[in-house]
Amino acid sequence: MKLKILLTALLLGISSAAARPDHPAEHQLVTVRVTYQDWNEYRPWQKTKPGSRRFFGIVVPGNRILVLAHNLNNATLIQVEKFDRPPRVPARIIHSDSQANLALITVDAPGFFDDLNAVDLADSMELNNPYCASWKSGQLTTASCRFSQVVVRSSFVPHFNYAGIYFITDLKGGGRGEPLFSGDQLVGITRSQDNDRIVVFPAELIQAYLNAVDLPRYPGFAQLGINWQTNRGLAQSKFLGLDGPARGIRVRSCIPGGSADGVLLPNDLLLELNGHAIDSQGDYMHPRYGWLNFTLIPSEGHYAGETIPARVLREGKELELDLLLKNIPPTAALIPASRTEQPPPYLVAGGLVFRELDTPYLRAWGDDWEKNIPARLRIYKEMENRAYPPNEHLIILTDVFPDEYNLGYHDLAQNIVVAVNGRPITSITALEAAFQHPEGAFHVIELSKSYDISKIILDAATFEDATRRIMKTYQIPARIRVRTKTE
Amino acid sequence: MNRLFKLGGLLAVLLCYSPTLRAEGGEPSVVKIVNQYNSFSWYTPWDSGSTGKGTGSGFVISKKRIMTNAHVVSDSAMLLVYFYNDPTPYPAKVVAIGHDCDLAVLELEDPTRMEGIPPLEFDGLPAIRSRVFTYGYPAGGKRISSTAGVVSRIEIQPYVHSGVDQHLTVQTDAAINPGNSGGPVVQNDQVVGVAFQGSSQLENMGFFIPTEVVQHFLTDLADGTYDGYPELGLFSAKLENPAARAYAGMTDGETGIRVEHLARGCSADGVLLPGDIITEINGYPVANDGTIRWQGLRLDNAFLIDQFQKGERVPMRIIRGKERMELEVPLSFYNPNPWLAKRYEQRPEYYIYAGLVFVPVNRETLETYGKNWYAEINQELIYDFYYRPIEEGTPFDEPLIMQIRRLDHAVNAEEARYLYRIVDSVNGQPAHTLQDVASAFESCTNAQQVIRFKYGNKLTVLDREKADAAHPEILNQYSIPKDRNL
């Protein structure tokens, strides 16, 4: 391990305490308060009960404040406080990267930044008595931290891998963007806390993000985009054409649109990436952190758009390939993992509620959603790792608002729509268009074959009247929302 | 409606296998049955079975025969029958068992004990609200117990013993408790049903198998073998919406259900077509909600199919492409239900090569994954087992093989391990059955044994010579007497 931790950190073992009154962090750390309101995934025309969040922002050069991006989700009001004291001043988002989970906000009020100072980002991992700082009741408090390990983690919003640094800490209720200092230098920003363990985004990721924001066009971070298996076994290694000790990993498949798509092939042994040798369980020697998983390489010091070399063994021959790094948007999947800023697209037709199927919808089943969602949706979610055309989504019939018009269909829920009036349905826009072309006197909605009904027939002549009547009865304000952004 | 393949049915509970028993007599025609069972594990299929004792009830139906529930005598290693006021156990054997209708017939090894015992006679379906009595040996009691109640409801319900079947049931508030299973339900001194299951959702309610189902079982059995219920393989839609009826060209007053799709290979496959409207089955008009009227009851139309035996023909009236027509659906012997059902009296099949354990994908092997297996297991298994046959029209009984375990050894421990994954091929040979897998491994002359899994391009490779050499060593180490039961 190349990381040097001074013993003093352990010996001092400082617990949470008010920092000295003139601590430099007082002028580098602000409190952010956000009021937010999430979409009601089940009733996509309305929002859920508003809530509020309090978290921390770190002052960075250019009169900007660095925060964790997820804290800004569905914000209806953003306010910043200096020294954890009034006044609360309105702030606005400058930039947000939901994958890296970092965002910049600023305050337009003149003179706001006059008594604030930008943090100094650490350029090494030499830790000297590291501690977390946060505001509590108008006082700056610090909590001692002890380095634990570095682990390559996948971001909550796919697809991004980062080196998460784990510390054991005295901090309570952290993970809200508290800065982690060594001396007066910023080592990282606290991403999450689980009991006494915090995960910190390292300074180099913060620096890479700040550099990227300053580019004329934000490139985003890249992801290799492969499914792979280890190559520890000598029998497999030999089968794949490698003599000598096992090394490299076996590519099982490439995620469509990812960096590896079309460059690496299934069954390739990936031996090196960007000059780093990959061992048989997928680790490489990180210059500072030691052995880490190779999926970190494409985002370590690189942005989408750059090219890195890869060495593979393909059908017994070693090949040197150029990998153009690409960002894989979180929306790129049959069931998108996130919608970013897009409210859920939906359509109410004859009392039947249709919407695009995405992971936020599935999450509405609660903490154990993966176990509790309907069986067929669980299969779609788990087996979706296949080629999917861009901008095509699964459309789901979520439920039915009962009316005489839709008699016989009142209990339908969670069915996948295949076609309407003979037209294949892959978006709300396509669904709306298909309802303009009834099959004679009927609307024919074809559902994915199941143990349930697979064809819904509705009367076309009274369709629009019924839709209006049902919307009135059940107080549905708007019939349709289409996707405003295309990826 | 369809009887096929219900994932559910988990709420009902079978009413036997109470672990304790104390025996003494009772009504002469009602017996107590003690089942010394032996059931094998599908997770460690080479192990000897887990043994135990369960008790249930039964009743004499002829000079030689005793009727009871299938679940009372399943997985039996030894059966003992106790008669009224007689402490002597009489060894018995199962002569016929219908897991799909949860009924079985026993005979004594020595039939002389049955002489002089009056067989009980069957009557038809009891009227709703009429009074019935149960007889049996609930909760390990020594003396026969009788309870009384009324007929609460007559309906098609899941038969939980097989996990996939549904037939007519009668619900009663006469207490039916563990140990009552297989006992007669009596009205006016005649048997109107066989007590068999309860429901965890309903308090003080029990279910019995009506004589319609009992007679179907006995009629089927008349030729000496039990073939089981025929399977139409019909997935249908109700037509409660007027637009759905108009779309099908139905006139006012016409009622029926629409054929959505048909299970491949089942009786109606190729006879009925998707989009057909079934208006009448065996002379009974089918209502828009899929029910028929029978003896004053509203029952699901599946009840009518249950009246037939395999090999018979069901007359139907249908609308096809707006043409009214009559046809007959010949009921074939093919029924994929047992494939999807729980398995009894079977030695689990498996094949081991160099520590890799392969088993067929079936209800029993899937359930080895744990209580919430259907939600937590790799979903490719659920898709291929339950959904692909519907969505892609493949047969429900298409065989699938999965790797269930790996017995670690230096020869396999470093190689990729994929458990509860469907095997696609071994050394390039398709792996549909354990025989396929065994012959692909054993006929291999390559340097490596290559196992490919069906989804995700997953691969396991073993060095053939080393694996061949390690194979007996692994069996010995893990104390496995045989490497296969194909």
Image: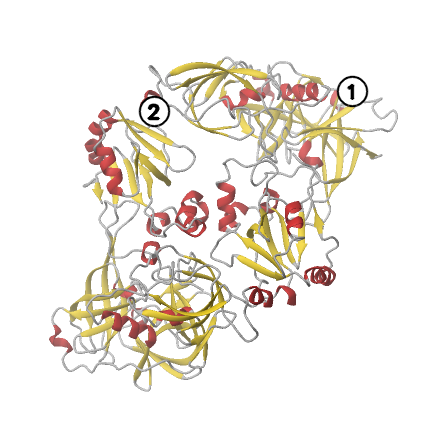
Q: Residue furthest right?
A: A110
Category of crowding for the residue at label 2, using alpha-carbon neighbours closer than 10 angstroms: few (below 14), some (14–19), many (at least 20): many
Q: Is residue B34 above or below residue B49?
A: below
Q: Residue B284: x percent and y percent?
A: 43, 76
Most foreground residue, A27 or A396: A396
Q: Residue B126: x percent and y percent?
A: 38, 82
What numbered label is drawn on residue A236? Answer: 2
- Does residue B329 appear in the picture of this structure? yes
Q: Residue A108: x percent and y percent?
A: 84, 28
**Image side of residue A445 versus residue B2, left or right:** right
Q: Residue B314: x percent and y percent?
A: 36, 70
**Image side of residue A391 versus residue B41, left or right:** right
What numbered label is drawn on residue B123? Answer: none
Q: Earlier in the sequence, mark 2 or mark 1?
A: 1
Q: Is residue A181 above or below residue A333?
A: above
Most foreground residue, B419 or B83: B419
**Residue at x-position 21% and y-position 36%:** B475
Residue designated by label 1: A62
Q: Are marks 2 and 1 on the same chain?
A: yes
Disc 2 marks a residue whose amino acid type is Gln
Observer-side mark, 2 or 1, equals: 2
**Image side of residue A44 versus residue B108, left or right:** right
Quadrant assignment, res B109: bottom left
Dot 1 lies on which element? loop
**Residue at x-position 36% and y-position 38%:** B419
Which image quarter is the N terminus of chain B in? bottom left
**Residue at x-position 51% and y-position 69%:** B289
Quadrant assignment, res A236: top left
- Label 2 chain ID: A
